[in-house]
């Protein structure tokens, strides 16, 4: 019998990017798993009986008198201290991990090596903030101040300290890797967390029942837009402003929007509005036939899959920022994607080959290109299928992501080999 391998996952919003890897490791009889996350995330996570989860209370943020450049850093230090206490208790109980896989973006990876110096620490390097050339200052509608630029420099301190302490870093795309300073890239491996392409696949018979009872299918033109939260970072303002032209150009078109009304990135909605959706609906008023626009909020994953499966064309817009899972999930389902011509999207989509690109800021051009592609649905379906081939080849969890993780985590290699016998 091989020795038991102990793996510790740490993510405040458990399981985060580690869901599929955690599920796989639970199938191995020679791996013992523990995961640490914020109590609220642990309570709602359904990750299987073999995973021991430990929740910690949400720590206090920065003090009122803390310099505003340091508020994020102080909040991360407080969270790092909270996680450290959990790790110390684990060590007292005699549970010492061989491998720790951690998202350091909220400070949880700052002190792990101080508690478990012999463990292999792998941190998830999601994004290195930059004052110029990436997301900050990209959108002239939401300009960055000089003060913002100085604050951003300090914000990277948390990731830098965590990565310096780690044995390895992991980031999903080449663009995200190259956003990091050259001095740190040698530690970072490009491994996408993986798409479940067996579950996310085309279904020509899919039917989506809307809240009003209407049923949508592939037999009619359906345009979809998805974001975790409907906000400018994902081009929601550009998309919304394309609606008058889109709906006028095709009287049969239905638009389905999935996403919450919060803010994941960037600044709050305009003063006087609870969300960007509310602000943009007020801006557009009766220039849009709202009876043909369906805001579904956040959906269960199965319902979200159905939305993609009935789509004729999927819109994906983003600042130069972290690539969303949704664009790869849409491609996996085989729906043609019209994406913004921004660097993270160009890494995945080649215009006219496996999808389509359009300028980020031009709402009229977005509407015109979308109308053209929807009118040629029979032709563009082939590009959608080539998009699925792209995901199968480069982003599938079983055949691409998992083997890459097992190769990186050397202690796991022997377990993977023995498990395949």
Image (cartoon, helix red, strand yellow):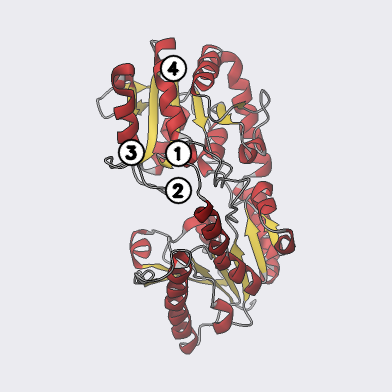
217 in relation to 360, above or below: above
Q: Nearer the viewer, mark 3 or mark 4?
A: 4
Q: Which mark is residue 224?
A: none
Q: Nearer the viewer, mark 3 or mark 2?
A: 2
Few, some or many residues within 10 Å of mark 3 (<14, 14–19, 20+): some
> CA gap, disc 1 to disc 3?
17 Å
**Residue 377 in the image: above or below residue 393:** above
N-terminal label among 2 and 4 = 4
Q: Position of residue 197 (x, y in %)?
A: 56, 41
Q: Are marks 2 and 1 in contact (CB under 8 Å)?
A: yes
For marks 3 and 4, give the CA distance.
21 Å
Confirm or deny contact between disc 3 and disc 2 (CB under 8 A). Answer: no
Answer above or below: position of 35 versus 405: below
* Label pair 3/4, CB-CB below 8 angstroms: no
Q: Nearer the viewer, mark 1 or mark 3?
A: 1
Q: Earlier in the sequence, mark 1 or mark 3?
A: 1
- Which residue position is annotated with label 4? 246
Tell which circle, 3 or 2, labels the residue nearer the N-terminal end.
Answer: 2
Label 2 to label 4: alpha-carbon separation: 27 Å
Q: Which mark, residue 297? A: 3
| Picture quadrant of residue 85 | bottom left
Q: Which residue is mark 2?
A: 266
- Give the spatial CA distance, label 4 vs label 1: 19 Å
Instruction: Give the total of numbered labels.
Output: 4
Q: Position of residue 291 (x, y in %)?
A: 28, 20
Q: Quadrant of residue 2?
A: bottom right
Image point (54%, 13%), residue name:
372
């Amino acid at each position: 019998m091989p020795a038991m391998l102990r793996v510790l996952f740490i993510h405040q919003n458990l399981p985060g990017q580690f869901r599929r890897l955690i599920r796989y490791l639970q199938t191995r009889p020679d791996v013992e798993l523990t995961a640490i996350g914020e109590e609220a995330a642990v309570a709602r996570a359904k990750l299987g009986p073999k995973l021991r989860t430990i929740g910690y209370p949400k720590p206090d943020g920065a003090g009122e008198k803390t310099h505003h450049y340091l508020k994020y850093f102080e909040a991360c230090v407080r969270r790092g201290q909270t996680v450290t206490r959990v790790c110390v208790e684990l060590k007292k109980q005699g549970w010492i991990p061989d491998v720790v896989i951690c998202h350091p973006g909220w400070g949880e990876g700052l002190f792990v090596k101080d508690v478990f110096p012999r463990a292999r620490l792998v941190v998830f390097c999601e994004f290195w903030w930059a004052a110029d050339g990436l997301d900050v200052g990209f959108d002239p509608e939401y300009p960055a101040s000089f003060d913002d630029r100085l604050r951003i420099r300090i914000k990277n301190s948390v990731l830098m300290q965590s990565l310096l302490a780690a044995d390895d870093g992991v980031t999903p795309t080449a663009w995200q890797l190259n956003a990091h300073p050259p001095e740190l890239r040698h530690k970072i491996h490009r491994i996408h967390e993986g798409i479940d392409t067996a579950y996310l696949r085309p279904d020509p018979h899919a039917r989506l029942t809307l809240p009003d009872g209407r049923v949508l299918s592939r037999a009619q033109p359906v345009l979809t837009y998805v974001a975790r939260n409907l906000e400018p970072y994902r081009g929601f303002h550009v998309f919304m402003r394309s609606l008058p032209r889109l709906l006028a150009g095709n009287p049969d078109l239905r638009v389905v929007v999935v996403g919450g009304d919060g803010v994941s990135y960037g600044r709050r909605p305009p003063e006087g509005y609870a969300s960007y959706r509310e602000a943009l609906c007020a801006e557009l008023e009766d220039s849009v036939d709202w009876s043909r626009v369906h805001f579904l909020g956040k959906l269960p994953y199965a319902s979200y899959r159905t939305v993609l499966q009935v789509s004729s064309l999927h819109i994906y817009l983003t600042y130069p920022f972290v690539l969303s899972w949704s664009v790869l999930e849409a491609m996996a389902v085989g729906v043609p994607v019209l994406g913004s011509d921004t660097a993270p999207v160009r890494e995945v989509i080649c215009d006219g080959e496996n999808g389509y690109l359009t300028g980020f800021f031009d709402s009229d051009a977005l509407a015109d290109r979308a109308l053209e592609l929807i009118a040629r649905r029979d032709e563009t379906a082939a590009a959608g299928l080539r998009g699925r081939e792209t995901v199968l080849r480069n982003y599938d969890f079983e055949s691409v992501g998992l083997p890459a993780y097992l190769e990186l985590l050397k202690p796991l290699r022997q377990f993977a080999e023995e498990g395949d016998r």
